[in-house]
Amino acid sequence: MTGSNEFKLNQTPDDGISSVKFSPNTSQFLLVSSWDTTVRLYDVPANTMRLKYQHSGAVLDCAFYDPTHAWSGGLDQQLKMHDLNTDQENLVGAHDAPIRCVEYCPEVNVMVTGSWDQTVKLWDPRTPCNAGTFSQPEKVYTLSVSGDRLIVGTAGRRVLVWDLRNMGYVQQRRESSLKYQTRCIRAFPNKQ
C-alpha cells in the first residue's frame, strides 16, 4: 500500500536497487541501477519503463551526464555511456576492480568514477575517454562532487577532498569520526 505522496513503479528490477537518480532538468525521468545487472530509465508521471540497459554484473551506480545521456558502472568493472534518445550504449572504459561510484561534475565537465581498485578516474564526456587516473589510499566506497570539489570516502574510514581543477595533490585528508565504514558522502550545495 502506498501513501498519498507515494506510488509504485511498474517493471521494477528483480533484485536490490543500488542507485536512484532524477534527470538534472526535470523530475519526469528516473534512472535506476540494480543488482539484477540492469540500468533502467523510467518516465515517472506515465509510470512506464522507457529503456533498459544490461551489464554483465551487478550495477552499483549510475548518473546522468545531461538529459539525454547516462553513465553506469558496477561489478563487471566496465563504465558505459547510454544515449537515451537512440537507445545505444558505448563502453567508455574500465577499472581494474568493480566501479562503486559514478558522478558528473558540471563545473569542470567531467564524469568521475571511484573503484575498489583504489583509484578515482576522470572521464571527458565529450569524447568520451579517460582524462586521468588518481590513486587513493584504499578502496573507494563513496564520492560526491560540489562545485569543483571532489570528496572521496575510502576504506579505513578515510575522507579525502580534491580540487577537480588540479588533481595533483589532496587538499584535505581526514579520518571519519564515525565508528564504522563510511558508505555514503554528500556535499552541501554551498560547497561545505
Image: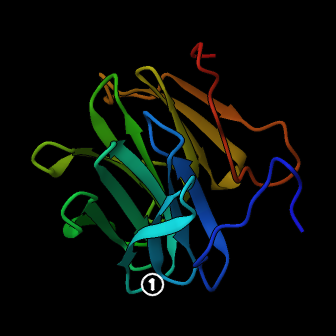
**Crowd band around label 1 with a 10 angstrom C-alpha radius: few (<14), some (14–19), many (20+):** some
Left or right of 174 on screen, residue 37: left
Residue depicted at 18% across the width and 63% down the height:
86
Q: Amino acid at mark 1?
A: Gly
Q: Residue furthest left?
A: 127
Residue 98 can be seen, yes or no: no
Above/below status of 44 relative to 17: above
Residue 82 in view in this figure: yes
SS at badge 1: loop
Vertical position of residue 131 compared to residue 105: above or below? below
Q: Quadrant of residue 83?
A: bottom left
Instruction: Please indicate whether residue 111 sits to the left or right of residue 124 in the image.
Output: right
| Quarter of the image that includes the C terminus | top right
Q: Nearer the viewer, residue 106 or 156?
A: 106
Question: Which of these two is toward me, 169 or 27?
Answer: 27
Please provide percent x and percent y for residue 74: 45, 71
Residue drawn at (66%, 40%), measured in percent from left and top?
185
Residue depicted at 53% across the width and 59% down the height: 46
- Percent of width and height locating residue 180: 84, 54
How many numbered marks, from 0 up?
1
Q: Nearer the viewer, residue 41 or 132?
A: 41
Q: 62 left or right of 95?
A: right
Q: Quadrant of the N terminus?
A: bottom right
- Mark 1, residue position: 57
Vertical order, 153 against 183 (above or below): above
**What residue lies at 62% left-to-right and 28% top-to-bottom?**
187
The colour scheme applied to this rendered structure is: rainbow
Question: Could you tell me residue 174's position as x and y percent?
Answer: 67, 31
Q: Residue furthest front?
A: 46
Q: Residue 103, how many percent across, how many down?
A: 44, 45
